[in-house]
Image (cartoon, grey):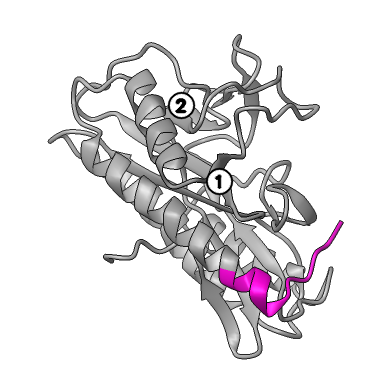
Amino acid sequence: MIEILTPAELGRAKVSGALVADILHTLKNRSAVGTNLLDIDRWAQAMILEAGAESCYVDYAPSFGRGPFGHYICTGVNDAVLHGLPRDYTLADGDLLTLDLAVSKDGVAADAAISFIVGESKPAESVAMIDATEHALRAGIAAAGPGARIGDISYAIGSVLTEAGYPVNTEFGGHGIGSTMHQDPHVPNNGRPGRGYKLRPGLLLALEPWVMADTAQLVTDADGWTLRSATGCRTAHSEHTIAITDDGAEILTLPNHS
C-alpha cells in the first residue's frame, strides 16, 4: 500500500516526527558507559506514553522476526545493525550504539535511527562508518522530490556508500510510512536512477542507509530479531522520515531544539 497524506495528516506527521527526534536526542544524551540497554528501552517507553503516543514496535510481528517484538526501541551494539532487541547488556567505552525508534501519534507514524559511539574512545573506523551513513542519508534526501523516482534516491545513497568502500545490502532498506510504520514503496540502499515509483507530494518515506564494515551478509541472532554482520564486524545506521513536498523533501525527524 502506498499512502499519499492530506495536508492535515502531514501536520500530524510533523508532530510524530519531532517526537521521535526529541526522544532519540534525549536517549543519546543519557546513554553512557554503564548504561543498560533495558534502561534505554524503559526510558523510551516512559517518554512515548507521556507524550500520548503509541509504540510501533511492541506488538509488531512481521514474517522476518520472532514476534511480537515486545519492546519500545531497537538497540544495536557494534555488530548488531537492524532490529536490535533490547537485552541485559551494559554499555562499555567505545561501543558503537544504534538506536532506531518509530512511534505513532494521532494516527500517523514516524521513524528514525541514529548511530554514535559511547564514552571517550572514538575508533576512527567507526567514526568514518557513521559519517558515511549520515552522508548517504543527506544524499538520498537531496535526490527526493516531486517527479523523482525511488531509483534516484537509491542510486544517491548507494553511490556514497560504495565510494566510501562499504558493501551494500539491499534486502532491508527504506520504506513508505504513514498510518502504519512499514509500507510500500521499498527504498533499497542501492539502485538505478530513473527507475521505480514516481514520487508525489504527500508521500512519506523513511530513508535508512546502513552498512557493515566488511560484508553485505546478515545473520539473525538467537533472539529471533537482531540482525548482525556475518563476520562480526561493526555496523552503522542512520534514518530520517521525510515528506515529499512541491518544493522537494522536508525532514520530519529533526529535534525541536536542533
Q: Residue furthest left?
A: 120
Give the quadrant of the C terminus: bottom left
Sequence order check: which comes first, mark 2 or mark 1? 2
Image-based side of 46 in relation to 143, left or right: left
The amino acid type of the residue labelled 1 equals Val
Per the image, the residue denoted by label 1 is: 103
* Real-space CA distance between mark 2 and mark 1, rounded to the nearest whole angstrom: 25 Å
Q: Determine the residue positioned at 52% across, 45% down.
A: 53
**Left or right relative to 31: residue 13:** right
| Closest to the observer, 257 or 187 | 257
Q: Where, by quadrant of the figure, is residue 87 drawn?
A: top left
Are there few (<14), some (14-19), or many (20+) residues within 10 Å of tag 2?
Answer: many
> Is 117 in front, or is 217?
117
Is there any visible trace of residue 221 in the rendered image?
Answer: yes
Numbered label attached to residue 158: none
SS category of the residue bearing label 2: loop
Q: Position of residue 189 (x, y in %)?
A: 65, 55
Percent position of residue 225, x then y:
63, 21
Query: Taking 250 as reference, is 236 above or below it?
Result: above
Question: Residue 226 falls in which quadrant of the image?
Answer: top right
Which amino acid type is marked by label 2?
Answer: Asp
Is 119 above or below relative to 69?
Answer: below
Residue holding disc 2: 79
- Residue 140 in sight in this render: no
Q: Residue at x 67, y 66 (%)?
A: 204
**Which residue is found at the position 58% from the left and 65% from the top?**
12
Secondary-structure class at tag 1: strand
Bounds of the magenta segment: 1-11
Indicate yes or no whether the magenta region holds residue 131. Answer: no
Quadrant in the picture for residue 118:
top left
Q: Position of residue 117 (x, y in %)?
A: 27, 38
Picture layout, residue 223 above or below residue 19: above
